Image (cartoon, coloured by chain):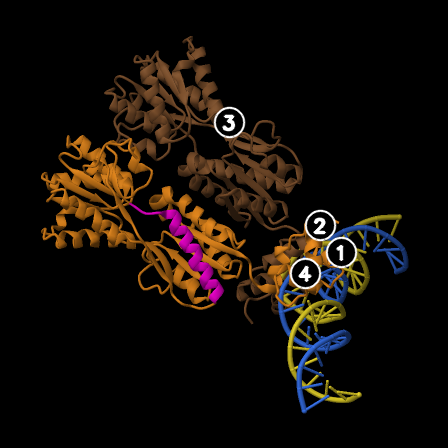
Chain colours: A brown, B orange, C blue, D yellow
Amino acid sequence: MGVPTLEEVARVAGVSRASASRVVNGSPSVGIQVRQSVERAVVELGYVPNRAARSLVTRRNDSVGVVIAEPTGRIFSDPFFVEVLRGISGGLASREMQLVLVMSQSPEEERRAERYLTRGHVDGVILFSLHGDDPLPEHLHSQGIPVVVGGEPPRGARVSYVDNDNHGGAFAAVTHLIDQGRIRIATILGPQDMPAGVTRRRAYRDALRAAGLPLDESLEKGGEFTREGGQRAMDVLLQRHSDIDAVFAASDLMAAGALSSLHAAGRRVPEDVAIVGFDDSIIALSTQPSLSSVHQSMELMGRELANSLLQTIDARDRAVRRVVLETQLVVRESSGGPPTGQN
Amino acid sequence: MGVPTLEEVARVAGVSRASASRVVNGSPSVGIQVRQSVERAVVELGYVPNRAARSLVTRRNDSVGVVIAEPTGRIFSDPFFVEVLRGISGGLASREMQLVLVMSQSPEEERRAERYLTRGHVDGVILFSLHGDDPLPEHLHSQGIPVVVGGEPPRGARVSYVDNDNHGGAFAAVTHLIDQGRIRIATILGPQDMPAGVTRRRAYRDALRAAGLPLDESLEKGGEFTREGGQRAMDVLLQRHSDIDAVFAASDLMAAGALSSLHAAGRRVPEDVAIVGFDDSIIALSTQPSLSSVHQSMELMGRELANSLLQTIDARDRAVRRVVLETQLVVRESSGGPPTGQN
DNA sequence: CAATTTCGTGAGAGCGCTCTCTTGACAACG
DNA sequence: CGTTGTCAAGAGAGCGCTCTCACGAAATTG
């Protein structure tokens, strides 16, 4: 007499189990009376369908796997993940789908995760923060498992993805610096084995080219998406070119590192050197001066990821869906915007 | 002829389904020959048990729910959550348990989540970042569902928890400021409806008392765990007492806000005012100057949460388990430590 | 008005697994 | 040599649900 079953609901409602099932699953072909009495019984008993039993017969799981791959996750995206997860969670909630989080922290766990995902325990998979050569999305996709990738997928993988407009955002950032009258604009690159890193670099070059400014590879320096990486890169850049008057950093974390370096070198920001980051994470507001940055809504991205995946699952097709989300430049003190506090 | 079933494994191995099941589940009472032939068949067919079918009969789910409640989650803990999740994930991995993430973003979703959790879809629940009066943990616990809370649980709730040593950490922070010769030490409080906020305040007072310094309520000011909250609080404190020479902020975010305020007021940090934060989040390294802070390992906390919950599930008891994790003061520039870059 | 179609409903099989109960083989005992 | 005990292995029920199929009543048709 613990948890009520469909059987009991049916008995209380005075109908067959089949009819009760139909009502619970919203089948259209059910009489108004039957529907009402079942609904009443459901409420009365506090009935909730047993997922296991349902899965067993439908061969669906009503759950999607969200994979956060190491070690990239640790470095790149910490500040965002919760946002994205929130978005995914929101997008899934309406469908009563559950979010199964898979964080593989070792090659062994990764294998286990892959086995788990390919054995039909989830209806679809959302993948995250991949390095350029990760075979997982392609692999899952070829096994017929619906997959959506957050961010640009690895080269050549023919899978659906949702990405922020990295090019547009970076282009806007560099153009903004140019509009401020800066002419020696350096960039601190992200990892070049990650699509986002590559695209932001390309946008940097495109913006310079569009403005008729000369390209100079020695104004590009980069590495990891970390604070230290940004700091070291800035040190090197200053050493190479003491006349740098602006920097576009491929992430806020790197921009924060660059800020320290500039500070240590006695450069004033933004008077001597203007700087713009990317991500508009929480960090952008906690630096001194506050950091101009390219804003991207990670929650929206999560929501789109969920929607896209649900579509693929519903449609049972293998169509590749691509969604690119707008980014927006937020100008703060570090590139000549008003002082913080306005927010 | 898609995914192989136990039945097929049994047939290939030439034994009964029951025996195959015994082997798969590691029952001791099974002959060596049977065991080997079943194991061979499992490998050959690439058999993986169907979780749904198993759950249906065992009434276990091999999954735990991790609940992140709004709106607290958004404010307080963004930077940590991924760490904690990583820890939980790691702690669960060895047992092949899956992590079901539940982020309720509205009262309606919250109700749905609660129904979901209480209807036996998970074997246990890990709860997070609660406000003082959240009835959920007590509620779940009273329904016989294993629960562990991250952080101090709401007053009066008799549930297991894993917490950082907030008192010890805050005490050490304030004592450190005293050791630096500071005598007018203010504090920026966290929300007083959250246990962590209350405890850190108490520790602040205890440290002053221990050092024989006078208590002065007008040196305490606080609000939300946000940057803006910290900034406003510092503004007020400076107005009240222009002779403040140190500040203990209950979070890094608040400390960062205080830093802006001090900067705007022309106070030098740490020369005029020393400051220590709490959390040692990524923010602590991106402020200028770098921020002394109380370090807590959120990943370890996650791992302990998982262990604790698994113990409770296994033991099937209602014992209340409490774990307190050490915290550690990290001294950086903002309270007289060496300049950044060492790290 | 009989023949047909439509539609709501019920009966019942069966998804893949675990677990109890039973059986059979063999050893130990009086 | 018959009895009891032990232990490995099989038979079979049944977990809660969905879904196909069959059925009877109502609605439609010629």
Q: Are marks 3 and 4 in contact (CB under 8 Å)?
A: no
Rounded to the nearest whole Å, what is the CA distance between mark 4 and mark 1?
A: 13 Å
The answer to whether residue A179 is seen in the rendering is: yes
Subunit of label 1: B
Q: Are discs 4 and 1 located on one and the same chain? A: yes
Q: Are marks 3 and 1 in contact (CB under 8 Å)?
A: no
Q: Is residue B230 above or below residue B118?
A: above
Q: Secondary structure at mark 1?
A: helix
Q: Earlier in the sequence, mark 1 or mark 2?
A: 1
Q: Is residue B149 above or below residue A199?
A: below
Residue B137 lies in magenta, yes or no? no
Kindly identify which residue carries mark 4. Answer: B35
Position of residue A155 measured from the top left corner of the image (x, y, whole percent):
57, 27
Subunit of label 3: A
Does the magenta stretch mainly form a helix, a strand or a loop?
A: helix
Dividing the image into 4 quarters, which one contains the N terminus of chain A? bottom right
Kindly identify which residue carries mark 2. Answer: B44
Residue span colored magenta: B295-315
Graded by Cα atoms within 10 Å as few (under 14), some (14 to 19) or many (20 or more), the crowding at tag 4 reads many
Mark drawn on residue A195 = 3
Kindly identify which residue carries mark 1. Answer: B12
Q: Secondary structure at mark 2?
A: helix
Q: Nearer the observer, disc 3 or disc 1?
A: 1
Position of residue A247 measured from the top left corner of the image (x, y, whole percent):
35, 19
Mark drawn on residue A102 = none
Subunit of label 2: B
Rounded to the nearest whole Å, what is the CA distance between mark 3 and mark 1?
A: 47 Å
